[in-house]
Image (cartoon, coloured by chain):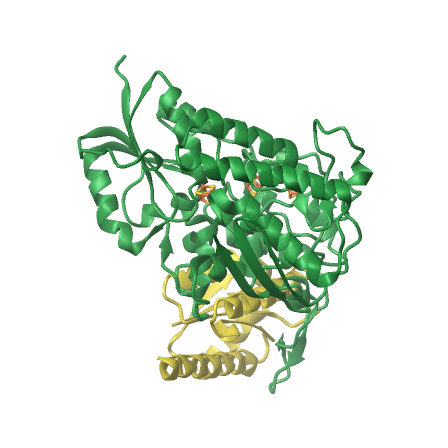
Chain colours: A green, B yellow
Amino acid sequence: MSKMKVLVRQLNGCNRCAWHLLALESFDSISLIGHSLLGNNDNNERVDAVILTGFATRKDREMLEGFRDRADLIALFGTCPYTGGIFGLANQRGASVLPVEDLIKVDMNIAGCPPGVGTLIETLTKGTSTLMSPLCSTCNREFQKQYLKEIIHTPSWDDSTTCFNNQGLPCSGVVSAECAQRCIDFNTPCRGCVPNVNDSGPGALGYFTSLAGQMDVDTKATEWTTDMLGDKPDEITKGIPDVVGTFFRYTLAHDFKRAGRLPTTGGLCSDIMTGRLIQEAPQIAATIYGSRGISVALTLIEAYENAIGVEPSEKTREIRSELRKIQATWTKLERKPDSKRFAEIVKALKTFAGNEVLSNVYFSGFKVPLKDVEYTFDAYSIREIDWKAASGYAEDENCKVSITVDDRGIIREWSCELR
Amino acid sequence: MIIAFACENCAQGSANTAGVLRMKYDHRIKIVRVPCAGRVGPRQIIEALNNGADSVAIIGCCFGACHYNDGNLITLRRVKAMKRMFEELGFDPDMVNMYTARAAEGDTIVGDFEDMSAKTDAMLSKEVSNE
Ligand code: SF4
Ligand code: SF4
Ligand code: SF4
């Protein structure tokens, strides 16, 4: 059988997916014609498949049409090209992030942030997308049918059996398929990076707010004596201070077709970070800052810890410094990207952070026991955190982060200078 | 265009009564009949807006009078969260509203219609002045 000629092209934003696709070099059935991370050796020849990573905007239309013309098959790898992914959140402030499918015809989607290369190979070999099981069917937590008593922003840390939605913490597992990163295994609710239905954001929001069907909501009487919904703050508005970032984390550009009208903060990443809940910020930063994500997430955690006066334990610091070593290795590798060495980085991340988007890494400590470390969990587990309005600053060898959080836990100001 | 999802019980009943009385309402309002206000959620609201509606309203039975027990009360929370969502996107929270009506009284739904037209007009004129 002749080899499949494949071209890998990274569009915009995080390049973690592109790093994963370096592994295509080692598959016998594939001949890698070009790869964005390996320099531009593309001579515009016809190829069997173009695999796209990263997010697209309207400006990419012409380039994408060019790929369409020269390839038999266009496959999207990662949630970014599929729905706009997490970068779609920038549309809140007027960006024009778009699903690639809004610009050209696409043959295959492999969703995930990031997905596994195995799923791509399987899909390419079979020629069609594989049917995935719903995430909830693979989750250890159980749903009890009942209305919510309260809406919360962190899970109860010692409960590993109750569905997050039951606890009052939104989880988009109900609209997601099984995935490569499995945040849910690290006491972190799913934010829906592998949508299982066409309108997963509205679906998840509808589901959760139905569960909240008994929370206090403001109503008022009209002049003609019937009732209507009121506009005063109530348990719903207080309970869900970031509706967009919670339910539309990975699908805003796909689900809602109007550009948001908030003023931009001046940068893509700060447009995404501003408005998010502090409790959710480490994973968001770890994702959008791509190959610098480890550093930014840890520094942001330290900036807020400094601001509210939380002292992480010695073991927590030790594990964080292991993570910074992984960051340093990755940064060095950028000069000469290599798939085997990247696989080692991913493996190390899984050991010290749970997964690639650092789901286990948190303020004050770690959420669940790490595999393959000898110390007891008590030595590095989360301590009580008093979430409050605060401003803080921290830096490391890769970045300087300053952050302002308001009394609802929302990030009001964000700046991150990469060095 | 304003899409008004009207439940087939009180809201649609009230619209029928208004019709019999030949009461008038804003021609921009397009009624979509639904079995219950509880049938409407973010999916339908966003679909209407993605397809060009200026605003969306949901009209159900009065509180305590829902023919499916509490469909209207459940949708209240969904609509409230969506108002927040629109604010977070820099839009007017009046892009979606929720009302109730009484089948025997045509002026209840016509009153709802007047309120949604006024709110939509205010929203659209604010948008023009911002441009
Ligand atoms: S943000 Fe996620 S989906 Fe997008 S390129 Fe990075 S890892 Fe891939
Ligand atoms: S909604 Fe989330 S926590 Fe609940 S069962 Fe599904 S994946 Fe698990
Ligand atoms: S659990 Fe995490 S990795 Fe899996 S689908 Fe949800 S957000 Fe994505």
Give the quadrant of the N terminus of chain A.
top left
Residue A413 x/y as whole percent: 56, 67
The residue lying toward the viewer, choosing from A254 and A264, is A264
Residue under the image location 64 percent in, 45 percent down:
A189
Q: Residue at x 64, y 37 (%)?
A: A322
Picture quadrant where residue A371 is located: top right
Instruction: Between residue B36 and residue B127, name the one nearer to us.
Output: B127
The spot of residue A222 in percent (x, y) is 61, 83
Q: Residue furthest bottom?
A: A223
Viewer-closest of A30 and A84: A30
| Residue name at image x 63 percent, y 64 percent | B77
Dividing the picture into quadrants, the one containing residue A78 is top left
- Residue A61: percent from the left, percent from the top? 25, 50
| Residue lying furthest front | A397
Does residue A353 show up? no
Residue at x-position 40% and y-position 65%: A94
Above or below: residue A151 compared with residue A71: below
Q: Is residue B103 above or below residue B22?
A: above
Give the number of callouts. 0
**Residue A321: percent from the left, percent from the top?**
65, 41
